[in-house]
Image (spheres, grey):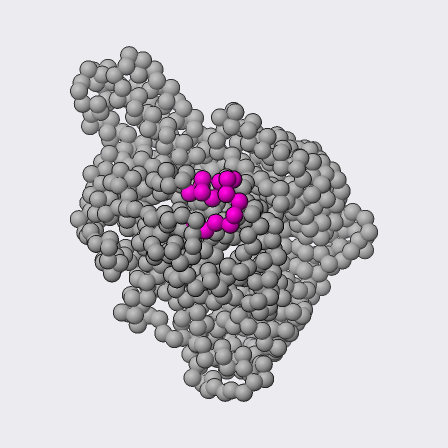
Amino acid sequence: MADVLGLRFKQLVQHYEAQAPDSKRMLIETLDGLMNHLRDMMVGYENEQVLSLMKEMEGMVDIEAWDRHGRYRSLMKRTEPVDVHIKRRLDKMIVTCEQLCNIRYNSNVEEEEIVLGFDNEIETLLDQLTATSTKQLQIILITGMAGLGKTTLAITLHNHDLVKYTFDLRAWTCVSQEYRKKDLLLSILSSFIDDLTDEFYEMSEQQLGEKLYRRLKGRKYMVVFDDIWDCSVWNDLKMYFPDDKTGSRVLFTSRDTDMSLHVQSARPAHVLRLRTEDESWDIFQKKVFRMGICPRGLEKSGRVINIKCKGLPLAIVIAAGLVKNNFSVAWWEQIAASLRSFMVSDPRQYIDSLALSYNHMPSHLKPCFLLFGAFPEDFEVHTTKLIRLWIAQGFIHETGNRMLEDVAEDFLMDLIKRSLLMTRRIKADGQVKTCQIHDLLHDFCLRKADEENFLSNNTRYDMVSSVEIRKYLQRRYLQLSGSICIDSYKYLRILDVESFYISLFPLDIVPLINLRYLAFRAHDGSPHASISNLVNLQTLIISSRKNIVVPKTIWNMLNLRHIYIKSGENLMEDPICLQVNRKDDCPCPTALASLQPLSQVSPQSCHNIFSRTPNLRKLGFCGPLISRLGELIFPNLGSLAHLQKLKLLNTFSYRIATRSCNPIEFPEKLKKLTLSNTGMDWEEMWTFSLLPNLEILKLKFQACTGERWETGDAEFRKLKVLKLQDLDIKQWVCSRYNFPRLQRLMVYRCLKLDSVPPTLGKIFTLEMIEVNGCSLSAYRSAMNIQEEQESLGNSFLKIHAKLYS
């Protein structure tokens, strides 16, 4: 919508500057269209600030005000197209529109905007990738110096609708200078398989290669190898890529222009060039302003900044991050004066521009940014893990009554807005799921961290708080020889040993009382009672093959903020009373007051614990959730006033369709609800429409049973995301009024579904429909919705439909 708003604004300026007799009529129509578009865009986002901004806009688009201040009629005879008053008015309108766009889109982070200015190159490469004349497996290579946009171009191609339609399977993997063959194979397989089981991680390279070969055999596939430094990686893996004359393609990106000779690519490498001044200015405007229009008062300084970037996209993006959301002329002039040009042929010279971005960063963001140097190059970081690591390192401090996680989330968004982080994957609710740092910025982090002695062996993430302690634990629990002095690591804060299996909870780490973050994977992951000795522990992550029992001593660990158990039906022992400054025998009012997520716990063990976890935000039950009378049941959540996300995974089979519980049993602030294997009758779904703040509803494997869902008069007033996955539904009858605020619909592997209701396309707020692995008729119905909406001029709704997942 922001792009369309920008287009309308450009039309506005063109009509105002025009000398045609009917230009005033066209101007009035454009002003009216602009305001109507803004009103539609802000539906559902009305608040005091929005209403104030809209009132300002209404005053600025008043045609009488334009005549009064701009002397419109006399201006038509002047050579100067726009006078000073109108310049100021246009600039003010742009800034106000930008503020409205930021409010509208700030809560849902859009995927990293692809701005290349290389339309011809995209078209050429698409032709090479999708050409039907050549059926043999072909290798295509994109090369160029660092920062030119090789990865961005590859992402554009990988995600292009034509590519999605052409290939049965697509995969993406980053290689970098140091790589492990096994990691690359797992990465490629993970693109085809949603959740790799532990069996895959225990396989040898040969076994994984055979799995990949069988997966690709007979299929038309496209695999991207990003950032290849030498040909050895392809020599190691090419045997697993069958050439069945299906038109499959392998795409490489590399800094080495001679790579095409080594990997036997189908044609010479496609070498990227620097951007022209006009292309650079277009990129700069789109990165700084959502509408892609720079106010005239800032254009002079903006063009100076743009010229000094010398056509290098990375420099343009970083410079844009410095001025984004700050429309002060003085600030732009300061940046224009201090941004030094650099030699694009020498990567060492990038440091000056990168350092400028770092030096202008608030002090509280610097350690958070530098921590990315602790991850391997091209590492895709899950934001939840990143935030927990920031907190564990002590980088985040409470601000007022806000939780540390909320403050850290703001820090993350600040780094993204400064264009220092790239968003790679987005959650269903529009929030950032994973992020990544450009390799040049990664190199800068390492240099700056070395200067400031920021990273040591104990904070390098790829060493996970020291390679030695990991090797020791691995030897210890594989009953091999080896010893180490644990006292050497008594100041250790972060220990992540999920990369290998151990048999039991690692008792050896109990003396490490400074640990803030502990993640491990074990055959039996039940923590020992002595875990309570880790009094400073904040995050506990457990992967276990067996169901685990969390000991009652866990309730003595007052600093615990996150308990994340990745699988199974796990028991929580009842808390024991804390004897801290207490002289009576009364039960303690709270225990883990800071605990926020708690996952994969059996409902049978949770009846007496929630009074001790008043600030839980995320909760996941796994266990029997259906009563013997066929009703959905779970422990009383009335004390969880802050609970926003709830997952219900039922393990109790019931012979007929089950019934929902009373909506009053759900917390009032609940925003996200996931149901799995609950077997409810579709007629029970109306009860969830009564949840006042529900924004995301996911119905997974057998969450509901029956062939027909008729929504009737139910109105999911605030629902933004609806996901249907692995359900037996055949007919879905609904209207646009059942989901008035829906933004995203996902339908995965509902094999019997006849069609996606065409009325959903009429929901004004709907931005995307995804249909994957459903029937041919469901696929066609989704495409028909897109065709119908395009014929009506709706270009906002995106349809991603595919027959097979």
Left or right: 1 in relation to 27:
right
The answer to whether residue 750 is seen in the rendering is yes
Q: Which residue is drawn at the image coordinates 28% and 30% (left, top)?
A: 90
The answer to whether residue 565 is seen in the rendering is no
Q: Residue furthest top?
A: 21
Q: Position of residue 184 (x, y in %)?
A: 50, 62
Q: Position of residue 403 (x, y in %)?
A: 46, 59
Against 208, is 430 above or below? above
Taking depth in this image into account, of 746 and 181 the one nearest to the observer is 181
Q: Which residue is drawn at the image coordinates 35% and 18% (left, top)?
A: 26
Place residue 563 in its image quadrant. Answer: bottom right
Against 297, is 212 above or below? below
Taking the magenta stretch, the answer to whether it contains residue 134 is yes
Q: Which residue is drawn at the image coordinates 66% and 49% (left, top)?
A: 700
Taking the magenta stretch, the answer to whether it contains residue 17 is no
Pick the quarter of the image with the N terminus. Answer: top left
Q: Which residue is drawn at the image coordinates 54% and 37% (left, top)?
A: 799
Left or right: 279 in relation to 561:
left
Place residue 777 in its image quadrant. Answer: top right
Place residue 25 in its image quadrant. Answer: top left
Query: What number of labels is visible?
Result: 0
Q: Which residues are magenta?
A: 125-140
Q: Position of residue 86 (x, y in %)?
A: 24, 26
Q: Position of residue 706 (x, y in %)?
A: 76, 42
